Image (cartoon, grey):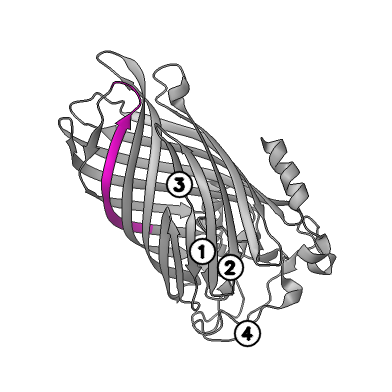
Amino acid sequence: MLTSLVIVASILGTDPAIVFSDGYAPWANSIVQVAPSKEASPTSGYHSKIDDSSISKPVVFRGQTVTDDIYAPSHQPGYNSFWENPFVKEFMSGMNPFQDEEVHTLPNYYDPFGNQMGTGSQGSNGYRLGWVTYNDITILPTAPAFGTTGDMKIVEWNSNLKYSHVISPGVLFNGTGWFSARWWDGPGGINLPAQVDQISTDLELGFFNDGPWSGQIAFHPQIVSTYEARLDRNAFNFDGRVIAMYTASPQWSFVGGVALWDRVDLLVVPHTGVIWTPNDRWEFRLLYPRSRISYFLGNYYDADVWLYAQAEYTAESWQTIITDPTTSDRMQMTDDRLSLGVRWDTGRYSFFTEGGYVFNRHIKFAGSTPSFDLGDTAMLRTGVRY
C-alpha cells in the first residue's frame, strides 16, 4: 500500500523550481530564518501580500510564535525567558526527546482537519515539520444507559507521536503512531471490560504546490483490543481517507473528500466544507465531521491565546470480551460533541482545555450482544501538543 502511495506521489510531483523557489529544498542544510515582521496591528496585517520569494521555503523560529510590539515588549522574535529557562527546557524536552531545538515549518501546506492552527499573531502559520507529540485526556461523566440496566462513565486518553517530512518536491509524508486507551465503568446489564486500548499507525501523503490545490491520501490500520483474549477480526480497524482543498483566496478555501471508517458498520464519512478567515482574529473551519470556530484573543506572555467552539462527530470500534458466557464481540460507539475551549499556543508548545456536551450516543455490537444507548452527558478535555 505504501509503495503505491509513493508511486502516486512521484506521478503528481511538480517541478522543484516551482515548488521551491531559488533552488532551495527543505532537505538542504541551509535554513531560512524568520525575519521580524513589520510592525502592524494583529487585526490588520494578516492578509498582507506574501513575498513570492519565500513561498514553499521551510522557515524556522525558536520556540514560539514570532510576536510584535503591540503585545510583547521584547524585540527578539520568538524569545521568551520562561521557555529558555534550563529547567523548563529539560522538562519539556523529556516530553518529546526527538524534537529539534529549532521548529521548522512549511508555509504553503494546510491540513483542514489537523490540530495545528492556520493563523496567528503574525499571520498565517506554516505546517510544522519534524517530530510532534500530542496527549489529551477526556472525561465523560456517568450517564444512564437505555436498552440495558445501570449507567456508564468513560475516561479517554489519546496519545500520538507524529513525524512530518518533505520527501520530494510537493510531497509531504506524515507518519503518526497512536496509543490510546478507554476506561469504562458500567453499564450494569452488560459486563464490558474495564479497559480497551488502541495501537495504530496513520500513514499519510500530502500534496502541495504554489498553486491553489493541495490534498492528502492516508491509510490508518488499527489494533483495538482488550488484550484479554487472542486477536481476531474484531480487534482490527482499517481506515482510509482522500481529501482535496482548493484555496480560492486568502479568505476562502473549499474542502472535499471522503473517509472510510471500518467499524461494526462500514461508515462512509464525507470530509467536506469551507474554511473562512476574514481577518487575523477569526478562523471558521465549517467542516464535517469536525468544525471549529476560533477567535484570537491576543498575545500574552509571548503566546497566542485562542478561544474556540468546536463540533465533532466521533465513531470508534473496539474488540470487547463479554462474560457470561465469555465471547469476543465488536462494539461500535458513536456520538456528537459540542465544546468550548481555550488554546494557548507558542508555536513549539500548545496547551488547551475545553468543556462541552455529548449527545446522540449509540452503542452497537456485531454479535449477539444487545445494543444500547447512553444519555447525554458533559465533557471535560485537556491536553498538550509539543
Of badges 2 and 4, nearer the viewer stands: 2
**Coordinates of residue 281 in the picture (x, y in percent):** 46, 76
- SS at circle 4: loop
Disc 4 residue crowd, few under 14, some 14–19, many 20+, Cα 10 Å: few
Sequence order check, earlier mark of 3 and 2 = 2
Report how far apart the C-alphas of labels 3 and 2 lie in the structure: 28 Å
Sequence order check, earlier mark of 2 and 1 = 1
**Coordinates of residue 45 in the picture (x, y in percent):** 56, 83
Q: Is residue 185 left or right of residue 56?
A: left
Read off the residue under disc 1.
Answer: 117
Read off the residue under disc 4.
Answer: 38
**Residue 269 image label:** 3
Residue range (magenta): 353-368
Give the residue type at disc 1.
Answer: Met
> Are dots 4 and 3 in contact, CB under 8 Å?
no
Of badges 4 and 3, nearer the viewer stands: 3
- What is the residue that sits farthest to the left in this orientation? 149
Q: Residue at x 56, y 60 (%)?
A: 348
Of badges 4 and 1, nearer the viewer stands: 1
Q: Residue at x 64, y 55 (%)?
A: 129
Q: Nearer the viewer, residue 227 or 328?
A: 328
Read off the residue under disc 2.
Answer: 125
Give the residue type at disc 4.
Answer: Lys
Disc 3 residue crowd, few under 14, some 14–19, many 20+, Cα 10 Å: some
Report how far apart the C-alphas of labels 4 and 1 lie in the structure: 21 Å
Give the residue type at disc 2.
Answer: Asn
Report how far apart the C-alphas of labels 1 and 3 lie in the structure: 23 Å
**Coordinates of residue 25 in the picture (x, y in percent):** 79, 60
> Are dots 2 and 1 in contact, CB under 8 Å?
yes
Sequence order check, earlier mark of 4 and 1 = 4
